[in-house]
Each structure stands twice: as structure tokens, then as C-alpha cells.
Amino acid sequence: MKPLKMTDNKTPGMLITFCGLDGCGKTTLMTRLSEEIGSKYKHFITKQPTESMRKSDIFRTYMDSPDHGMYDYRTLSLMAAADRIQHVNKVIKQELDEGYVVISDRYFYSCLANLRARGFKKDKWIYEISKFIIKPDIAFFLDLPTELSIERVRKRVEEKNRFIDIDLQYRLRNEYIDICKKNKGVYVPTDKSEDESYEIIKNKVKEVILKKWK
């Protein structure tokens, strides 16, 4: 795996991203960070892929059903990548230009993780597309044992019966760990207490803020 060659963030704002398996604690830890940041800095919370992508037939087929026969996964991956480029350059960048701290639930790394986890490890196009994506100032990768992530998802009332490709989740976890290492992300174990996980995030954000806005 090669590192992604994203565009350095040259705006006055700061971009912080969170990636990891469903159930890894993104929402909980992002909420804590936004509450703390909100008392000092103007901030904007967003999510990838966008709602229009999430509601598409192809996305819902891959999320909700084991039968993917009518679609080629590359089609979904290309659509998701295009959705992220549009979102980064027409939504996130505008907020960064205004000096906001932008916190994103998932980011382009998830495209790469899913593509590779589904067996498309030789595809080069995703590395070319990454050049049009703004590189986060901090990329957090939340990690916990796959069994625990699935258990957490199943505890959500609205998702207790959702289709989950369990084998895929194991592969995704490995891909996220590798992507974190290759792209100098910040590894955050979330199988410990919430306070312990958040302390890692809080300290890293404080460190980068001091460097960027000193």
C-alpha cells in the first residue's frame, strides 16, 4: 500500500477527520471534541459520504443486503470518491477558508479501506483522485476488536437486524490500521474507557492547534 498524496491544507482553518469501523466510537468522541472546541473556536461538523450518496440505490444495496450481483463494487467506489471530492471542495474548503475547525465523520481514507478490503488492491485510480482531496491536519483512526464493534452496532435499536458482512469487517479493520500507519494518522484504541480514548484526541488537537495558530 502506498500513502495517499493529498493536497496540503493551506487554508486558515483546521481539518480533523475520524475513521474506523461502525461502532468504534466516532460519534461519541467527535461530540466531546466539538463541545470542547466550540467554547473556543468556530467549528463545523460534517459527514462522508453525503446523504445523497447514502440514499442511492447502489449504496443501500451494499449496506443492507448480501446480494450485490447487480452492481460492480468499483462503480460504488468511484461514485463515493466523486461524492467526497465534491464535498471536500465545495463544502469543507469553504468552511476552512473561513477559518473554521472542520470535524468530519469519515473521510477519503474510508474509500481506500473499503476498496482494498473488497479485494481491489491493485487499483491505482484512487491514488490519482486523492490529489484533489485536502489532507487533514489530524486524521484519527479509531480502533477496537472487530467483535466488539459488531456488538456495539447490534445494540443500536435501529441497526439490531441490519445486514453486516462480518468477514468484511475484519478485513476493514486491518486496512484502517495499515492506512493509519502509511499516512501518519493518529491511532486511537477505543476498547478502553471513553475518557482514556478522548485524552489521546484532546492532547493531539491541542498540540496541532498550538503549531497552526501559535
Image: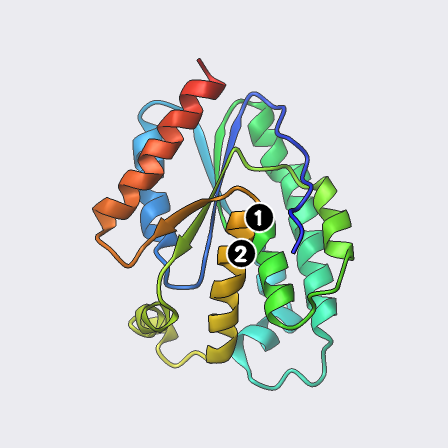
* Label 2 crowd (10 A; few <14 / some 14-19 / many >=20): some
Label 2 residue SS: helix
Quadrant into which the C terminus falls:
top left
**Considering only vertical position in the picture, is 127 above or below 138?**
below
Q: Which corner quadrant of the image does residue 152 belong to?
A: bottom left
Would you say residue 50 is visible in this rendering? no
Is the residue under label 1 in contact with that under label 2 (CB below 8 Å)?
Answer: yes
**Residue 86 place in picture, x, y as percent:** 69, 45
**Considering only vertical position in the picture, is 196 above or below 114?**
above
Which residue in the structure is indicated by mark 2?
A: 178
Q: Residue at x 47, y 64 (%)?
A: 173
**Residue 143 place in picture, x, y as percent:** 39, 57
Which residue in the structure is indicated by mark 1?
A: 182
Q: Amino acid at mark 2?
A: Asp
How many circles with numbers are drawn on the protein?
Answer: 2
Q: Is residue 46 left or right of residue 50?
A: left
Q: Residue at x 33, y 47 (%)?
A: 29
> What distance separates the C-alpha of mark 2 from that of mark 1?
6 Å
Q: Amino acid at mark 1?
A: Lys
**Residue 142 place in picture, x, y as percent:** 40, 53
In-front residue for pair 4/62: 4
Quadrant into which the N terminus falls:
bottom right
* Label 1 crowd (10 A; few <14 / some 14-19 / many >=20): few
Would you say residue 126 is visible in this rendering? yes
